[in-house]
């Protein structure tokens, strides 16, 4: 799959597309890497308060292997428009946004790499009839989520700290995102630069709409979320990545996911535990990237049949 690529294929390209909802039209953004005519298109979707630039290291690596990689910013994150009300930040809005993106990409199928919330959206899509997802990577997300961890995520998503510089913001990120694993100074700096936004006072803050956290504001720490009704309908090959010390996705849940549902019944579910990480592995480490590359690099019967008929 490794091909000689033009220089521009290894640099990010930036695009905008419209999303229509009950709030009217808003503009959403995505970053694209690799050749548009690639045989494989990979969508990488970020977590609750993050944005598509978290995947730059993974995207560049996959683009070097000839893949097309698309990393969107969900509504209210990164460069995408904010929504006019907190009640619009719900699963159905995110699914509609990703359906619009899939239509714009104009490909028969995609691979999906989703971190946390991005994994949730990928799992929801993969469970729908006729879903164009060939392979699914769930990064520290599964069919049962621990309430205490959801409560913790809600608490830090509500933080609206101000910083006098990007360097100060970076130090904050190093603290709250310590579970992401061991990152290099370059990677922390990259994350800080693409997390920074200026507020009305000219100070720096994290670049997401505080309204996205409303769902979590009163979340009881003892109440878990069960999504077995979604997971059990997923039919495509799936790779579950779990941070070794994750408080959101437990080992027992991963074990159950490898036994329950359509994909599991066909032996299509596998898992890898990522050492020295909690929720959620950054996917910037070369070792993490190699695991994903190996999984996505495999052919499946559906792809082989289409290639043979073409």
Image: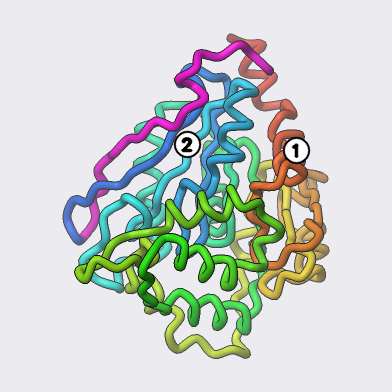
Labels 1, 2: front one: 1
Along the line of sight, the residue nearer the viewer: 266 or 174: 174
In the displayed structure, does residue 186 sit left or right of residue 181? Answer: left
With respect to residue 186, does 310 lie above or below?
above
Q: Residue at x 24, y 71 (%)?
A: 85
SS state under label 1: helix
SS state under label 2: strand
Residue 205 percent coordinates (x, y) = 36, 67
Q: Residue at x 70, y 47 (%)?
A: 285
Contact check, label 1 and label 2, Cβ < 8 Å: no
Residue 289 percent coordinates (x, y) = 70, 41
Query: On the image, which quarter does residue 180 sit in?
Result: bottom right
Disc sitting over residue 290 in the figure? 1
Is 67 a magenta residue? Answer: no
Along the line of sight, the residue nearer the viewer: 117 or 121: 117
Residue 125 seen from this side = no
Disc sitting over residue 70 in the figure? 2
Dot 2: few (<14), some (14–19), or many (≥20) neighbours within 10 Å?
many
Name the image colouring.
rainbow
**Which region shows up in magenta?**
2-22
Residue 54 seen from this side = yes
Residue 301 percent coordinates (x, y) = 72, 26
Q: Residue at x 21, y 66 (%)?
A: 84
With respect to residue 309, does 109 lie above or below?
below
Is 8 a magenta residue? Answer: yes
Disc sitting over residue 207 in the figure? none
Residue 127 percent coordinates (x, y) = 57, 51
With respect to residue 169, does 66 lie above or below?
above
């Amino acid at each position: 799959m490794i091909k000689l690529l033009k220089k521009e294929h290894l640099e990010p390209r930036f695009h905008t597309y419209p999303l229509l909802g009950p709030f009217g039209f808003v503009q959403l953004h995505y970053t694209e890497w690799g050749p548009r005519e690639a045989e494989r298109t990979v969508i990488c979707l970020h977590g609750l308060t993050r944005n598509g630039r978290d995947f730059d290291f993974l995207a560049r690596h996959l683009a070097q292997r000839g893949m097309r990689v698309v990393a969107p910013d969900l509504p209210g994150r990164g460069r995408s428009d904010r929504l006019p009300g907190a009640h619009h930040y719900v699963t159905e809005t995110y699914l509609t946004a990703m359906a619009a993106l899939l239509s714009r990409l104009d490909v028969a199928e995609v691979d999906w790499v989703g971190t946390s919330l991005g994994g949730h959206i990928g799992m929801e899509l993969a469970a729908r009839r006729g879903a164009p997802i060939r392979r699914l990577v769930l990064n520290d997300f599964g069919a049962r989520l621990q309430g205490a961890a959801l409560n913790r995520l809600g608490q830090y998503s509500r933080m609206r700290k101000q910083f006098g510089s990007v360097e100060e913001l970076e130090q904050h990120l190093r603290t709250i995102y310590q579970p992401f694993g061991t990152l290099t100074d370059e990677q922390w700096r990259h994350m800080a630069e693409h997390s920074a936004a200026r507020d009305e006072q000219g100070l720096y803050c994290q670049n997401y709409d505080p309204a996205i956290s409303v769902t979590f504001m009163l979340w009881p720490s003892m109440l878990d979320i069960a999504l077995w009704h979604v997971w059990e309908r997923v039919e495509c090959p799936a790779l579950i990545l779990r941070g070794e010390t994750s408080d959101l996705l437990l080992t027992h849940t991963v074990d159950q996911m490898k036994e329950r549902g359509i994909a599991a019944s066909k032996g299509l579910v596998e898992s890898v535990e990522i050492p020295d990480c909690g929720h959620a592995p950054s996917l910037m480490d070369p070792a993490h990237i190699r695991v994903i590359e190996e999984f996505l690099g495999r052919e499946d019967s559906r792809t082989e049949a289409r290639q043979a008929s073409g």
